[in-house]
Structure formats: structure tokens, C-alpha cells
Image (tube, rainbow, N blue to C red):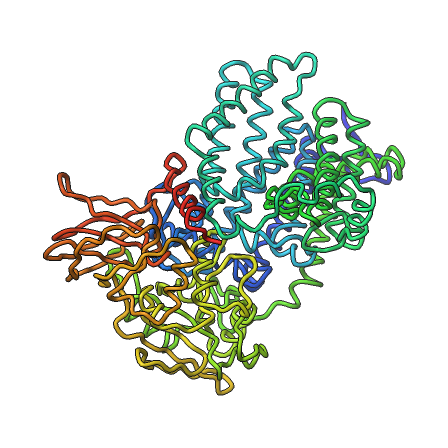
Amino acid sequence: MKHHALPGHGPSLHPAEAKLLRVWLTYVLPALAVLYVVVAGLWLVPDGYLGMYGNYDGHWASWNARGILEWGRFFDFSPFSPLSGTGSVFLPNLPWLNPAALALAIPAPLPLTHLASMLVYLAELAVSLYLLYRHLEFSREQSFLATILYICIFFIPFNGYTLSLFWYALAPVNAHLITAMNVATIALIRVGRERLAFKLLFGLVFIAAIFVAFASAPISMITYIPVFGVLWLAFLIPFQAERSGVLWRWGVVAGALSILALIGAPSYQTATALTSARGDAALPIFHQGWLLLSPDFWLELAASYPLCLNEIQLMCPSAIIGWFEIASLVGGLCLAFACPGTKRRYGVVIVLLLVSIHFYALLSLQQVLGKLHVISTPYLMWAFFPLAPPSAIAAAGFAGRLLLPRRAAMWPWMPSVASWLIALVAIVVWVEFIQPGQPRLPGRGVLGLPPIAHVPVNEGPIVNYLRQHIGLRPGSEFRGYAATFLGAHDGLVRKATNTPGETMTWRAYVAARELLFDRFGNSFQTMDLWNSRIPTFEEYGQWTSKQMYLFTRDLLAEPEDGLDLLMSSTLVYRFRPLLLRALGVRFVIADGTLSDPIIKQVVTEAGKGGATANLYEIKDANLGQFSPTHVMWAADYNTAVKILREPIDLKDGVVLLGLPERQPELVSASRSRLVAISDGYHLTASAPRLAMLVLPLQFSHCWQIETAPNVELPLIFRANIVQTGILFKDNVDVRLYLDFDPWKASCRFEDARDLELFGFK
């Protein structure tokens, strides 16, 4: 029977043709439109807060991953960095199971490796979100809409318009962690639904995904556990015929937790918190005591609730993110009451998470839960956002069914309309609001396109001189650290920031990043030096040790100085060349004039507006050759600080912590040499009898010695509060390496016991 077109209508589409057209209009073309905006944004948005690997933390994240690839051993949870903090460890956001981090090793210019990395993050994020939403029993269309909605709110470049948290710019590893948690959730759901062989397979997938999350970012992954754990719990509650499947799910979760416990993950994380400077700032849990039973306390707390403080990302009605959360809450309520099975569980989870996180934000105002608030509200909201888009899409669906005629609401082309609505909004926002504000760099990039909006660092006379004299690569000899001191009385930064002459502040150093970069094209701090392979005394990151932070506070600063209250950086607030020399600082960058008998000026660099920066060399800096023969004992940390605040030459003397012991007769060592290698140093030296070396390396009980068989091992000990001492006889030819893995956390606990025993506070 022939089909005839109805009068007044065009020829009707064949069902297969209509289906193919719907696929193109619902999925392919809107996805390409959004992808175009994302790639254009990655290409054209500068690497500030909004661009790829942007701003200070984003630059640090890039350096950290690339540094581990260069300096770390495969799958080492304590990759050693000789470039920062007189030898510390890279934050172990390990790249080995993170394909987007591995992309940073591509032999290409840095902007292109950043682009490749971000595209991998985007791909794994989009695919895992779509699959997760499908396993939550949303349709293909709903899952696709939810995926592109998430990308269009949270990913680059849209986050600059929606004012969501900038963590895909500052910490892109979060995309990989979300992917791992999505995969774990999918596997957990499938475990309860498959036959035996596939139950085992998906059980292994769940365990593997949790391990990948832990191995990729052992500390950061903790922030996702509370949020995704609530979703997992919803699938661990037995309902009628699912009871046998739920038992399998419980078994898989128990297996994953057991494996993490067996490899020592809890000990690793606890030991890290005990020795980190940032882990010591929290108040005790329920420190308000009986006030918690007072209605006035809670009324006062509620009155100061910062609902619209953007950094917290709560349900603020004047923010796009706030309306996204409101839509998610409405959708969650509708799903909880109107849908059966998985969707109902999911809806309850969304409502419970939103209520719980907002209440947690209220408690955090007074730190009611003490150290538990180390996982702050923004981290929890960030972990929640990937789960929320299907609920927001469901809210829109419920609203459509209420407001539109039934025939229009059920129109088969409605998903295509919704997809194009999101895609067109994305294009309009890009073209009208984001793109016009982007700078255009001169010249042409690859394929004739404009250059990627990555602002390169200028390597002028100072950096070139430092790289030539102390630049460090695996296998090269350690030749000293650089330090940046911006507290000179006539310094540019002091004047520009109106810092009083009798103080120096962390805020001035932060302001100096932009001030110096504007004038010299280089901030002369942290990543701008590390990326040029220049090791520095300064350190930055959440891995900064408590011992070094306190050392800096008490010996390279004064009480009136304004230190970093976040405890994430070590800086030189007071110029004390004798002490810096002992720590291995050979060069000092200053924005003003310095004078001291043991320093000499070696380079002056001119900048814009008549600005100048000077490079000074400290004579006879400790490169590993300091071999003191006189020992001074200090019973505790405060006593050691008093001794070291005196203008003593630590080339011949050393301060040891503890009760006085019988001092052996020491001689000076000679021919000492430190060679930087993967995860540590190779040390050689000789002496006619018993000798001591005080190395320019931060001390830890995790330092291990590897030497030839049947050779007497040298003794490693704490010297000058934070330095590594070596006691040896005759000759030493050893490899020093840090050995702090999850299954070997006892050494970090020894570090923590030192802090308590000697009164570091």
C-alpha cells in the first residue's frame, strides 16, 4: 500500500530516516556545538582563573604533574622534589593511572600539552557522566541533556560566566577523580543486577576504580567519599527482590575498603595530616561545649549564614549555581515522590545531600565539628555537582508536563529542542559575553589560528644566570638553592604594597606575583623558577611540612610579620644570610638593595618603568660539604630556636635536639658531592675517621639509605631542627631516597612523634 503525503504537508519521513535525523539533531550537532565552544574557550581564554591550568594553583598543578613524571619513580607515593622547600615531596597526584596527566609528557610546547590534557579530561568526564546517568535509569535523551548541562555550567569556558568553582582551571585532576567515582558507582549498580560472572567482573571494576582514585590523588579523593558514599548507600539498602544483589554490593564495598586498609591508605592519610602544616589548624570537635544546647547559639549562627558567598556555592537565588541547585532540589523531590525504583532512590539522595551539605556549611561557621571541617563546603559541593544534572533535567521535564499541553510535552522532537536550547545558550553566552573579553595575542598559532592564550614567562638575565649556575636535572650535581627576598628597605614590592618598613607580609609576596610579572615578565617565585629547573628554598602547596613552616616563622621572620595563615607556603621574611647559607641557599633574588659581608651582587635586571631586580650570591653556601665538628645540644624546639637565632656559623657547629650525649671526636669530611637522582640524591664523601655532614635537605625519618652489601650504613639524624645529618666513617657512597608509601607509613608517624616530643608549636 502506498503512502501519500497529506495535502498541505511535505513528504513524510521514513521512520528510519526520522530516527537518524533525531539522532543528529538531539545528540551529534548539539554536542559538536558545545564542543566547539569548549575548544574555542580552551584555546582563547587566558590561563588566569578561567583558562586551562590557570592562575597560580593551575600553574602549580601542571608543574607538579610534570615534575613527578620527570623526578618520580613509577608508582611512588612519595615522589621527591629537589626543586622546592630544601627538598620535600611533590603532592602525590600521581600521573601513572591518569591519562590526562600523562598527556603532559607529550613532547610539545606547554600550551599544546595543556590543551591535550584538558581534552582528555573532558572526554573521560563526559563519557562517564553519561554512562552514570544511564545507570540511574534516565533515558538516553535525559542523560545526554544532563551531561551537556553539566559541561555548560562547570567546564571551561562557561565557569567564568556561571561563576562556578574554578577547579577545572586550578586543579583539573578533579575531572579524573569524578570519572573514577562515576565508574565505581556504575560498577556497584551493575554488581547487583548481573549474573555471577559479571558480578565478579564489575566487582573488580569497582575495586579498581576506587584504587585508581586513591592512587591518582590519595588526599584529594577523600573529598568525594562522603558525597558518593551517600549515593552508594542508596544502592546498599535491600528492597524486595534485590536482596541477593545488595549482599553482593556490600561484599564489593567491604572488599574495596579491606584492600585500602591492607595497603595502608588510612595510615598514609593520617600520617600526612599529622605532619602537614595545614593539618594542625583546626579546633577540637564540639569545642563550643554546652553552648550547642542553646537556641540563641543556633539563631545567631543562622543569622550569619553566608548563603550567597560565592566561594561556598550554596543555594543562592541571585546566582546561576544557586538556581541550578534549586532546580536539582525540586527535581529530587519530584523523583522521590513520583518515580519508583532507582529514580526514587536517586531523588532521595539528591535532597538528602543538598540538605546535609547546607547544614554542614552552617556548622562550619563556628567549626563545630573541629577537624572534620578540613573537608570544607566548597569541596563537598564540587563533589555533589556531577550527581545533580539529571535531577535538574527532571525538574524541567516535570515543569514541561505541567505547563505545556500533553501532546506538546510528549512530542518526540522535544529532546531535540531541549538539546538545541542548551547548545544555543552556550553559543550565545560564548559569542556575546565571554569571547569579546578575551585578548588576542599577536602572531599565528598552529593551523593558522591565533596563538593559544597562554602567557609565557620571560627568562631574562637573572633566570638565565641561575639556570646556568644552579639549574638541576636528574643526574646533575646539586649546586645550591635560590631564594626570593622582597623585604629590602628600598624594594619595589614594599613601596607598591605600602608594607611598613618594620614588617614583611605574605600578602606582599602574593601581590608581588603580578607586580613583578608586569615589570619583568617573571614573578621570580616558585613555578616561574621551578619550570626553569631552578631549585628554591621557598615551597608552596598543601604538602608544606609543619616543621619547615614553624622554622620559617621562628627563624626567618619576626612576630610582627604577617605570615601565610593558610600555612601553605614557606617564605623568607627576614634576610639572615648565615642561616640561609647553612640551608643551602646560594643565590638571593631581591627587588631592592641588600648588604652583608658574605654576599655579592652578580646580576642586575632592568624591568618596565625603571624597575630593577638584583641577584646576590651568598659565599660558600652549603652544597653538602658542611661538616661540623662542634655539637650543641637543645632539649626542645624552643631552645634550638634560641641558639639558631644567634649569628653563629653553622659550617663548624651543629644543633642537635635531645638530651646531651657523649660527643665522639669528629673530623671534617672532604670531597662531598650531592647528585640529584630520581626520588633522592646520590651522596659521596670521604674522611680519615668519624665525620658528620649536614646536608641542605629537609629531614624526615622516611629517608632511607641504599648502599653496597656488607657496607656499614651511615647514621641519619635530625640536625639544626629541619636539616638532614649524616654520620659516617672513612668513606660514604650511598643513595638517599624517600620511602613513604601507604604500606610504609611508620616513618611519617615518627616524624609526627618528633613534633610532639620536641615541642614544635
Instruction: Please tell me whether residue 303 is drawn above or below residue 612 in the rendered image.
Output: above
**Image coords of residue 261 (percent x, y):** 46, 29
**Residue drawn at (52%, 70%) of the image:** 509
- Front position in the image: 175 or 586: 586
**Residue drawn at (83%, 39%) of the image:** 9
**Image coords of residue 94 (percent x, y):** 42, 45
Q: Quadrant of residue 687?
A: bottom left
Instruction: Please tell me whether residue 125 is drawn above or below residue 532 in the rendered image.
Output: above
**Image coords of residue 437 (percent x, y):** 65, 68
Instruction: Please tell me whether residue 520 is drawn above or below residue 380 in the rendered image.
Output: below
**Residue drawn at (26%, 66%) of the image:** 651
- Front position in the image: 329 or 291: 291
- Front position in the image: 1 or 759: 759
Residue reaching furthest to the left: 688
> In this image, 222 relative to 18: left or right?
left
> In this image, 140 relative to 441: left or right?
right
Tell me the quarter of the image containing the N terminus: top right
Q: How many marks?
A: 0
> In this image, 167 relative to 313: left or right?
left
Instruction: Please tell me whether residue 350 is drawn above or below residue 65 in the rendered image.
Output: above
Q: Is residue 208 visible?
A: yes
**Image coords of residue 569 (percent x, y):** 48, 60
